[in-house]
């Protein structure tokens, strides 16, 4: 198979999107990760390279600056895997992200170069890709499973609320932030955002205030669910209200509201180190469709 490697430009985004759609169809994952707007943020913000076979893009990758580090991402056509194309692409990306020499030692590969951190991002990691990344000295630093729920299937009965439940509004925004902070403060990697930072991250054109709910009791906020079009963004219960069905009740209520609005499916992400949330959503009929991951 004759390959032609060449630099890519924003004009190649349609070809990259076509390749991304083939990868999503084979590997699973979110259709949104094959959208031009998503790909532009990764392939038009730094340097990108692609491999063409008979005029068709069969592999591509990009490196962009992220603070003091370099972030890399790549795609390989499912029909062209197992032929060394992925490993060749990865070595090109590492070389672009930080000047390195690959030195073989007793069958192993060491990276020798500048100390600039390199972060590799993938929206749907396969076992083969995971093994390849480890062989290049990369280590997994983050992973979360992407779940999907078909809303045409029946939802569990919505329980009677024990607490007062309110939609998102300017008046309830503070209660939502209180519930968010108390629910996730004990989670690894909690960012400790201020109210303004969290709201800025959460609320955009896709946010659904009428489907986002906060439960409040005499002691203050007890739990919340935040939604966007097609997504449950966050669901949490403060420690005193865990294991009492509150997070499940809020999630069911939100799913019902989203279906009433015409949604036919809903997605969410669950960190692999959060088995309690994973069990909750599996119990609500969600199924894993992909695993997103980062390596450094």
Image (cartoon, helix red, strand yellow):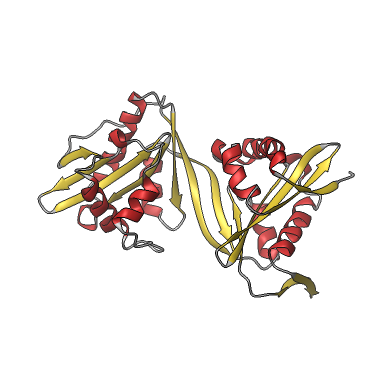
x, y percent for residue 18: 69, 35
Q: In the rendered view, tell whether residue 23 sits above or below residue 7.
A: above
| Quadrant of the drawing holding the C terminus | bottom right
x, y percent for residue 206: 41, 36
x, y percent for residue 14: 68, 35
Q: Nearer the viewer, residue 225 or 247?
A: 225
Quarter-of-image position of residue 47? bottom right
Q: Nearer the viewer, residue 205 or 176?
A: 205
x, y percent for residue 240: 20, 56
Locate residue 118 relative to residue 52 in the image: left or right. left
Measuring 22% from the left and 50% from the top, which residue is drawn there? 174
Q: In the rendered view, tell whether residue 180 sits above or below residue 97.
A: above
Locate residue 127 relative to residue 257 in the image: left or right. right
Locate residue 206 relative to residue 33 in the image: left or right. left
Q: Is residue 252 visible?
A: no
Specify the farthest residue to the right.
2
Measuring 61% from the left and 44% from the top, which residue is drawn there? 40
Q: In the rendered view, tell whether residue 105 sits above or below residue 211.
A: below
| Quadrant of the drawing holding the N terminus | top right
């Amino acid at each position: 198979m004759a390959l032609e490697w060449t630099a890519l430009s924003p004009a190649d985004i349609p070809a990259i999107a076509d390749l991304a759609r083939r990868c999503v169809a084979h590997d699973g994952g979110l259709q949104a990760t094959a959208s031009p707007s998503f790909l532009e943020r990764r392939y038009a913000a730094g340097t990108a390279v692609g491999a063409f076979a008979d005029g068709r893009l069969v592999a591509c990758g990009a490196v962009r600056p992220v603070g003091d580090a370099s972030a890399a991402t790549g795609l390989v056509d499912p029909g062209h895997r197992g032929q060394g194309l992925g490993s060749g692409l990865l070595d090109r990306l590492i070389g672009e992200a930080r000047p390195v020499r690959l030195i073989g030692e007793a069958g192993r590969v060491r990276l020798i170069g500048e100390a600039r951190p390199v972060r590799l991002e993938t929206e749907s990691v396969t076992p083969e890709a995971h093994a390849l990344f480890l062989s290049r000295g990369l280590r997994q630093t983050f992973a979360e499973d992407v779940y999907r729920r078909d809303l045409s299937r029946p939802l569990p009965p919505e329980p009677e609320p024990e607490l007062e439940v309110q939609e998102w509004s300017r008046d309830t925004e503070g209660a939502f932030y209180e519930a968010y902070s108390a629910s996730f403060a004990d989670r690894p990697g909690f960012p400790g955002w201020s109210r303004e930072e969290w709201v800025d991250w959460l609320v955009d054109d896709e946010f659904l205030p009428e489907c986002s709910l906060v439960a409040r009791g005499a002691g203050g906020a007890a739990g919340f669910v935040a939604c966007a079009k097609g997504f449950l963004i966050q669901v949490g219960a403060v420690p005193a209200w865990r294991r009492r069905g509150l997070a499940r009740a809020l999630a069911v209520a939100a799913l019902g509201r989203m279906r009433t609005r015409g949604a036919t499916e809903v997605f969410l992400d669950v960190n692999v180190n959060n088995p309690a949330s994973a069990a909750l959503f599996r119990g609500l009929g969600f199924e894993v469709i992909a695993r997103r991951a980062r390596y450094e």
